[in-house]
Image (tube, rainbow, N blue to C red):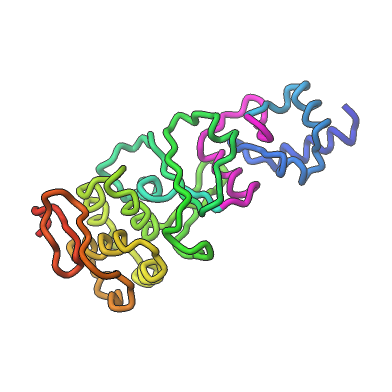
Amino acid sequence: MSKENRTKLNELISNWPKGTIGTTNFLKKYNVGYELIQRYKKSNWLETVGNKAYKLSGDEIDWYGAIFAIQKQLNLSIHPGGKTALQLLGYAHYLSDSIKDIFLYGYRGEKLPTWYKKNLWKVATHYSAFKLFPRDTVIGFTRYSHKNFKIKISSAERAMLEMLYHFPKYNSFDDCYQIMENLVTLRSNVCQNLLEVCNSIKVKRLFLFMAEKSNHSWFDDLAVNEINLGKGKRSLVANGILDNKYKITVPKKYR
């Protein structure tokens, strides 16, 4: 290997966070193109993970390292949210510490790369590309540290709304309410902003009902009259009872 190519390799390795995927976008930043990639693979410096995706030979990659590449190198908004973010943030105490299902969220038109979908990552991935929030909604995120890198995940406020989006398909009423009871430190201003731009009437009504039922102090700071809750009744649970304030059916034990 020439001195120039070894210098490129050293620079690449020193700037490659261990435990993460390196896409061709990342490699190009260090002037590592197709020919050099093949040389590095032949010399056992790199291993192929999938189309246009690589890892350092012998490195162990989990789903966190895959999400890092999706966010930092492919510049997609795809992020862990909903129940997954709430677990990572420590709000889902009654759930197992082991995350077996991860819930990822992005905007319409964004797709998980093929290399991600072809790897198992030892978890089941549920991805939603939806319009729960407008594309330019930048509030409701935080950073989560894993190994020696960070990924963007939903904050507790946004994650709760995302979790309610998946009611009742993935999350039961009881699951959602139990987590809501733990959310004693939510920021009312963040909740207000997210609720005002949220596009789901079902999600907003459920969130407000559960928050008020949980007697959270931050609920009193919300301007509910400024949140569009739509019109008419919503039947959300079978054999439930109607809550007259939010016009949704809820399990009888919650009334």
In this rendered view, identify the residue nearer to me: 247 or 221: 247
In this rendered view, identify the residue nearer to me: 138 or 182: 138
> Left or right: where does residue 12 sit relative to residue 55?
right
**Image coordinates for residue 155, horizontal then vertical, percent:** 42, 57
Q: Is residue 238 above or below residue 133?
A: above
In this rendered view, identify the residue nearer to me: 148 or 25: 25
**Image coordinates for residue 60, horizontal then vertical, percent:** 57, 29
Residue placed furthest toward the front: 232
User: In the image, which residues are magenta?
Assistant: 50-76
Q: Is residue 106 above or below residue 66?
A: below
| Residue 62 is covered by the magenta coloring | yes
**Image coordinates for residue 58, horizontal then vertical, percent:** 63, 24
| Residue 234 is covered by the magenta coloring | no
Task: Give the position of the C terminus as an image quadrant.
Answer: bottom left
Task: Give the position of the N terminus as an image quadrant.
Answer: top right
Residue in the image at 34% along x and 56% along y: 160
Residue in the image at 73% along x and 26% along y: 45
**Image coordinates for residue 14, horizontal then vertical, percent:** 72, 40
Q: Is residue 147 above or below residue 119?
A: below
**Count the marks: how many?**
0
Residue in the image at 51% along x and 54% along y: 107
Residue in the image at 64% along x and 47% along y: 74
In this rendered view, identify the residue nearer to me: 99 or 118: 118
Q: Is residue 183 above or below residue 218?
A: above
